[in-house]
Structures are given as structure tokens and as C-alpha cells.
Image (tube, grey):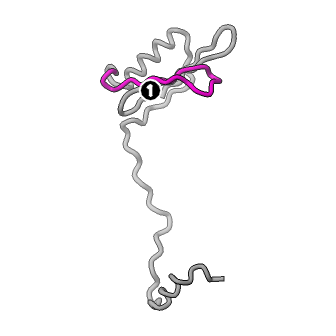
Amino acid sequence: MIHLRYYHPAGGSKDWFAEVRPDGLVIRFGKTDARTMQERFIPVSECHPDPAGEARSRANKKMKKGYMLVREQPSLAGVAPPPPEKPIRPVAKPLPGVSSVLREWEKENTENWF
């Protein structure tokens, strides 16, 4: 994601965001303090050479107009999620020697322990 900001000479500012996604590029823009922003989607087929390249090209054009880079972070689009972590505690296994009668009683009386 790329975040740019333009500071007006008379005060105030406006923001511009580019977010790379597997299906294309999302551009959001508007006043810095606005509750909502305008949003445009550019599909992969219209991104040249790809969504990341399109985002960089558009950001460079904005910076030539006076926008300043606030933050840039690598896109996670196309990156596989990390593998699931193993549980810290193993799942409890039935204890050997517990009679089936006691297990049956426990199923019926789980709410009446105290």
C-alpha cells in the first residue's frame, strides 16, 4: 500500500492511497479528515505492467504534483499466508482406566458439579 498526502498552501490536506490486490488495484482518495473517501478499482487487465507497477506509476505522477509520501508498505497480494501454528498445549486425551460408566455420568451431569 502506498499512502500519499498533499498539503494545501492555505491549510488542510488530502490523502491518496493505492492498494495492490490479486484482482487489481484499489485507489482511494479524499480529504484527510473525511469520514469516507472516494474509491476506484482498476482490474488487472488495465494495470500496466501489473497492479504494483500501476500503483508505483500513479504514485510518481501524484508526487510530481506535490504529494508527499506518508507511508509505503510491501503488498501482501500474492504472498501465501503463514502456515498454521501448532497448539501450545496438546489436545486432552481420555485418561486410561476411566470407566465407561463414569464417562457416561460425566456427559449427563456436566452442569451439576457444584
Marker count (numbered): 1
Residue at point 55%, 14% (across, down): 67
Secondary structure under tag 1 reads: strand
* Picture coordinates of residue 86, whole percent (x, y): 44, 60
Q: Give the residue at mark 1.
A: 26
In which quadrant of the rendered view does residue 53 lie? top left
Residue at point 62%, 83% (across, down): 113
Magenta stretch containing residue 37, yes or no? yes
In which quadrant of the rendered view does residue 70 lie? top right
In which quadrant of the rendered view does residue 7 lie? top right
| Segment colored magenta | 27-46
Q: Is residue 48 left or right of residue 34?
A: left
Residue at point 66%, 82% (across, down): 114
* Picture coordinates of residue 8, whole percent (x, y): 64, 11
In the figure, 81 relative to 45: above or below?
below
Specify the amino acid type for callout 1.
Val
Closer to the camera, 100 or 97?
Answer: 100
User: Which residue sits furthest right?
Assistant: 11
Disc 1 residue crowd, few under 14, some 14–19, many 20+, Cα 10 Å: some
* Picture coordinates of residue 32, whole percent (x, y): 62, 22
* Picture coordinates of residue 109, whole percent (x, y): 56, 83
In the figure, 2 relative to 113: above or below?
above
Magenta stretch containing residue 58, yes or no? no
